[in-house]
Every structure is written in structure tokens, then in C-alpha cells.
Amino acid sequence: MLQVKNISFRYKKQTVLKDISFDVKPGEHLSIIGESGSGKSTLLKLLYGTYDLNEGHVFWKGEEILGPKHNLIIGPEFMKYVAQEFDLMPFTTVAENIGTFLSNFYPEEKQERINELLGVVELKPFAKTKVKELSGGQKQRVALAKAIARQPEIILLDEPFSHIDNFKKQSLRRSLFKYLKEKNISCIVATHDKDDVLSFSDNMIVLHNTKIIANNTPEHLYNNPKNKLIASFFGEFNEINNEFVYANQLKVVDHSNLKAIVKQSYYKGYFYLIEADLNGETIFFEYDTQLEKEKIIFLNQVL
Ligand code: ADP
Ligand code: MG
């Protein structure tokens, strides 16, 4: 189990994290969310032992993970970290990059393993391509494959799909998280994308103002968003009578005490997001078709 105990950290002037504690069990998937600059990347780097902590401790299975003051080589054997700015060898091939940490002693097994990993990140056709010729998203996939090549016990991923286009993102996400679950590899993902979290994380942590303001299952936080930051992570929402109501939880009805005037319709594929005015406040709800501007409608909350 990863145990993070009361850690605090500041860069020269700025305190980024204060008194952070949480646990991650073997095979558990945890997401870290928070606005840009909230310290997600810093937290992953601290777990990896990149910097010395100002306070607190990090343990994996009882063994302390220590910073550069105590270690010549950053990063423990059992842990892999994929940075937001991944680091690859540009002039060698995809296959060679993925095999960086694999032994040359058993060439056949090495080749087999590389093929398996190319499959997980969907890069089989690019095995012999030089990394410098790849797109940002393809490089990101090489970095992911390289990180899981030697089967770590725990992997830290910093916005792992941020450079990957939507065509590939969905299937890659399923493939990678499924692979990690099957191998019982713990995983901590820093992300601002709810799609990385909802289907794949056992737990999520919300960072705000140097603190953890929530630590629970995605389902619990989706159903009980206790502030705007959490609600906005999951989607378009409204604040009605001091409650957070997602746009898809408002339905048009014949009569109700929520009377609104349509202002704009945004096409979203299988629905329209409608912007409307409710007593001078802007609200959003989902509807099957476009609605005429200035049309008066009544809304009801459905849960
Ligand atoms: P996030 O990943 O959530 O966007 P970061 O962990 O990258 O946040 O950054 C948290 C805060 O720490 C930001 O205000 C950022 O400017 C600052 N910061 C990040 N890296 C450094 C650094 N190497 N030196 C000084 N300040 C930094
Ligand atoms: Mg970051």
C-alpha cells in the first residue's frame, strides 16, 4: 500500500501542498484532480521522490520513498512515472524506446514483450518508426508503453492522454487501464478530464488551495458535489436553491415554478445544450432539439 502521511512542500517562495495524506492500495486506481496550478504535477513528483519533502513521509509497503538528499538515483524500482513532458530517445525506433528497460539477455522474450506493449498502446504499425517522426500523441503512447514495460507495482501518470486525439483516446484509455487492472498495478493519474476518472478510478482526490478538499469515489462525488469546483469537473451545472443541478437533470415540463427564457442552443450531437435565463441568472439544461430564442419554458428537476 502507498501511504502518504501529512506531506507539505513549497518551491522557493510558494507553498504548493500542505498536510496532504491519503492511501492507495495495491491495484487501486486513484485520480488527482484540481485546477491548473493546484499542485497535481508537484504531488506526483513528490511521490516519486523527485524533491525532498518539507514535512511528512511517503511509504510503499512500509518502505519510505526518499528524495534526492538520500538517493543518487531518483525514483524507486517498483514505481514508474510518466511526466507531462515525456522523455524519449528521438533518434531510435518506437520498439527500441519501449524496450529501454528490458534485458537483452532473452531477445525472443524481449521481442514478444515489446509486441504485447505495442498492442496495449496501439502502436504496432509504428514499431520501426523513429520517435522523432511521431506526433505528440504517438510519443505520449511510447512513453506509456516504456513505463509499463517492466511491470511496476505502481505507476504515476501526469495527464497521460493530453496529447492524444479523440479518435484514439477512448480505446487507448480502456486498453491501458484494463491492462493495469489485470496486472494489479496501482495507478495514480493527474488529470482534468472526467473521462479519465468516471469509468476507471476507484477513488478521486480534489486539490484546492494546497489542501485535499475531497477524497471519495467518483460516483459519490458526482452525486454529492459539495462545491462548484467539483460540480464543474463533471459537467455543465446550475446552482438552484443552493443545490448543484447538472444540465441533464433539468427537464422541460408543461408547468412548474422554474420559468425560464431560452437564449441560445448549442448542438452537442445527440442533444442540445440550452442556455436560458431564470430570474436574471443564466442556467443550462439539455434538450432533444434546438429551441427558439425568447421562448418561455418551464423546468423541473429530475434526479
Ligand atoms: P498542476 O500540475 O496542478 O497544474 P503544478 O504542480 O505544476 O500544478 O504547479 C503548482 C504550483 O507550483 C504552480 O503555482 C506552479 O507555478 C508552481 N511550480 C511548479 N513547478 C515549479 C518549479 N519547478 N519551481 C517553482 N514553482 C513551481
Ligand atoms: Mg500539471
Image (spheres, rainbow, N blue to C red):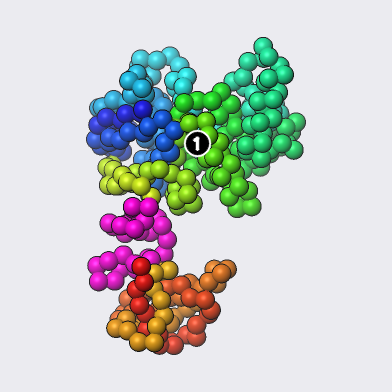
Quadrant for residue 148, please give it.
Answer: top right
- Residue 126 percent across, percent down from the top left: 73, 36
Residue under pointer 1: 181
- Residue 244 percent across, percent down from the top left: 31, 65
- Residue 200 percent across, percent down from the top left: 47, 45
Quadrant for residue 226, please give it.
Answer: bottom left
Disc 1: CA contacts within 10 A as few (<14), some (14-19) or many (>=20):
some
Q: Is residue 274 left or right of residue 8?
A: right
Q: Which residues are magenta?
A: 219-246
Q: Is residue 15 left or right of residue 132?
A: left
Quarter of the image with the C terminus is bottom left
In magenta segment, residue 88: no
Q: Residue at x 58, y 26 (%)?
A: 149
Work out which residue is located at the far front of the displayed protein and give it: 182
Q: Residue at x 41, y 27 (%)?
A: 48
Mark 1 secondary-structure assignment = helix
Q: Residue at x 38, y 19 (%)?
A: 68
Q: Residue at x 44, y 33 (%)?
A: 27
Residue 139 showing in the rendered view: no
